Image (cartoon, helix red, strand yellow):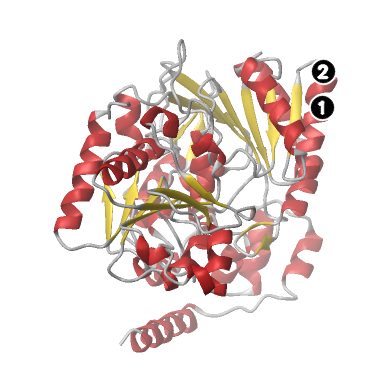
């Protein structure tokens, strides 16, 4: 039987307290590596011992049923509901694959009262939108506990507060690092230009990204940084496409570094073989696409290589978290970032206050612009004066501007930012654009005349042809027009929210 860590026990008690206050649907936040599987398995076992029934809904049952895993350690014997299940599972604890559960509930029949028979429903990775659809079949008086390392949504997605009444956040990544439960990271990398990478839905287009990485020879930076900062270390690499993953895998093997690639189409037997060789250390670098982001647990991973950019904060944190677990002889790990991710989302180890409400600006305000230490090449927050290696910066004029703007942006909402940008210099606009993770076109929308547009192109050292191309879509507006437009948007927004 597993003994809970202090913070895990506190999470359980906070959850019980929330239930006593009348909340029926609770989202429980536990960072990657904090042991959320342990926490909800402990809760499930306690509920079972009271003679009650528990339904766990997941999209990755393998990690729960693996030999020597959490279920084994708690003595949990669970029934499964998968596509291969022919009869309605009848047990105290049932683990259901979310898509199978949804299809069976849609068809009703013998599953008419299936969900309502359970005293507790646990949703693993509850922030993922795939789980939203099952809530229409859950009676409102059923207790639902969602578990997630990253309870976060943004934009037009259904907000988590549509499904949950309360959020429990007891511990954060910095706490777990300082207390020795997670490894301490160091971040290195190289900056890349993403201006020519389109967005597909809510993230970067993987095909565009692959071509940009080839054109900018990012693979050379990956190999150089790996050999320089983490030679012969065990690494997991995340790519945006199968093509990118296979390409970098080939390049590693060409220079004698044992590497393997897996993706969704890798046969199960081959995938298991590769994972085993990786765990045993015969494969040094595991290149993957969407396979090892969640649920893959190998505490001996020493390096996380981000061979991609992402707009998704949860995905960024999940990828970095693969290297955060502690192991014998390991209490540090390295993040090699080749997608400007740390600049866009902040460092993996920085504190974050989660919310059930959708968020479009808050986490971007909390993220950090970064700079590279000229001595050890670590990436550090832009305001760092002394690196851990001992290097001391002399603050430059541009750094002073960056620090001032960073402080300003923390206080601004979307409308205030548009007003703040009025009259800013090219230098200041460029800093705002990079800080907010906008495309360069945002800067062009702030310019008020073709003369400004031409001057901006000259400031950026663009060739003369750029101006003739850019002005075809350029719609200059005076500062007065911009101010009036902002006020109109604010009024429309106010009326919509009345």
Q: Position of residue 490 (x, y in %)?
A: 38, 82
Taking 294 as reference, is 27 above or below it? below
Question: Residue at 23% of width from left, 30% of height from top?
Answer: 6
Identify the image quadrant of residue 466. bottom right
Residue 290 drawn at (x, y percent): 65, 45
Foreground of the two, 65 or 234:
65
Q: Nearer the viewer, residue 428 or 106?
A: 106
Q: Is residue 483 visible?
A: yes
Left or right: 392 in relation to 276: left
Query: Relative to 140, is 189 above or below?
Result: above
Residue drawn at x 66%, y 73% is 450
Tell which of 134 and 114 is nearer to you. Answer: 114
x, y percent for residue 216? 77, 40
Q: Relative to residue 70, is residue 62 drawn left or right?
A: right
**Which element is circle 1 on?**
helix
Horizontal relation, residue 14 to residue 470: left or right: left
The furthest residue to the top:
329
Separation of residues labelled 2 and 1 (CA atoms): 7 Å
Q: Residue at x 75, y 33 (%)?
A: 269
Query: Which residue is denoted by mark 2 in the rendering?
Result: 255
Name the residue nearer the viewer: 43 or 314: 43
Q: Which residue corresponds to mark 1?
A: 251
Q: How many marks?
A: 2
Identify the element where label 2 is drawn: loop
Q: Is residue 251 left or right of residue 38?
A: right
Asked which quadrant contains residue 386, the reply is top left
Asked if disc 2 and disc 1 are in contact, CB closer than 8 Å, the reply is: yes
Q: Is residue 342 visible?
A: no
């Amino acid at each position: 039987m597993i003994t809970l860590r202090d913070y895990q026990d506190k999470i359980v008690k906070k959850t019980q307290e929330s239930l006593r206050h009348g909340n029926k649907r609770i989202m429980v936040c536990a960072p990657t590596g904090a042991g959320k599987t342990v926490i909800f398995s402990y809760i499930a076992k306690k509920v079972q011992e009271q003679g009650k029934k528990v339904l766990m809904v997941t999209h990755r049952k393998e990690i729960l049923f693996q030999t020597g895993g959490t279920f084994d350690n708690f003595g949990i014997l669970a029934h499964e509901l998968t596509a291969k299940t022919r009869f309605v599972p009848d047990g105290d604890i049932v683990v259901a694959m979310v898509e199978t559960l949804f299809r069976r509930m849609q068809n009703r029949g013998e599953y008419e009262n299936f969900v309502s028979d359970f005293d507790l429903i646990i949703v693993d990775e509850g922030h993922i939108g795939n789980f939203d659809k099952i809530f229409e079949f859950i009676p409102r008086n059923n207790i639902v506990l969602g578990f997630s390392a990253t309870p976060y949504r943004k934009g037009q997605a259904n907000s988590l507060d549509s499904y949950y009444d309360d959020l429990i956040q007891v511990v954060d990544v910095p706490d777990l690092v300082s207390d020795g439960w997670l490894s301490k990271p160091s971040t290195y990398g190289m900056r890349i230009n993403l201006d020519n990478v389109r967005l597909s839905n809510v993230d970067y287009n993987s095909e565009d990204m692959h071509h940009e990485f080839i054109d900018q020879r990012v693979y050379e930076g990956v190999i150089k940084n790996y050999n320089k900062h983490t030679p012969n270390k065990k690494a997991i690499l995340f790519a945006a496409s199968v093509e990118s993953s296979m390409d970098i895998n080939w390049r590693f093997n060409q220079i004698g570094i044992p590497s393997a690639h897996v993706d969704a189409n890798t046969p199960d037997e081959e995938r298991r073989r590769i994972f085993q060789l990786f765990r045993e250390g015969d494969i040094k670098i595991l290149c993957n696409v969407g396979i090892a982001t969640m649920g893959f647990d190998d505490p001996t991973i020493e390096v996380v290589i981000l061979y991609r950019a992402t707009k998704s904060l949860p995905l960024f944190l999940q990828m970095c978290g693969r290297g955060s677990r502690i192991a014998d002889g390991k209490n540090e790990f390295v993040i090699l970032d080749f997608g400007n991710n740390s600049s866009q989302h902040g460092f993996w180890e920085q504190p974050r206050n989660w919310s059930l409400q959708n968020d479009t600006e808050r986490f971007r305000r909390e993220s950090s612009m970064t700079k590279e230490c000229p001595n050890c090449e670590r990436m550090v927050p832009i305001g760092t004066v002394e690196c851990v290696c001992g290097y001391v910066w002399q603050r430059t004029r541009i750094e002073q501007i960056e620090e001032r703007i960073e402080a300003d942006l923390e206080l601004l909402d979307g409308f205030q930012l548009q007003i703040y940008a009025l009259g800013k210099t090219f230098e200041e606009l460029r800093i705002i654009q990079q800080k907010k993770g906008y495309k360069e076109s945002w800067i062009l929308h702030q310019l008020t005349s073709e003369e400004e547009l031409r001057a901006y192109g000259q400031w950026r050292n663009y060739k003369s042809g750029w101006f003739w191309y850019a002005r075809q879509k350029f719609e200059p507006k005076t500062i007065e027009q911009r101010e009036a437009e902002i006020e109109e948007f604010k009024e429309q927004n106010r009326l919509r929210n009345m």
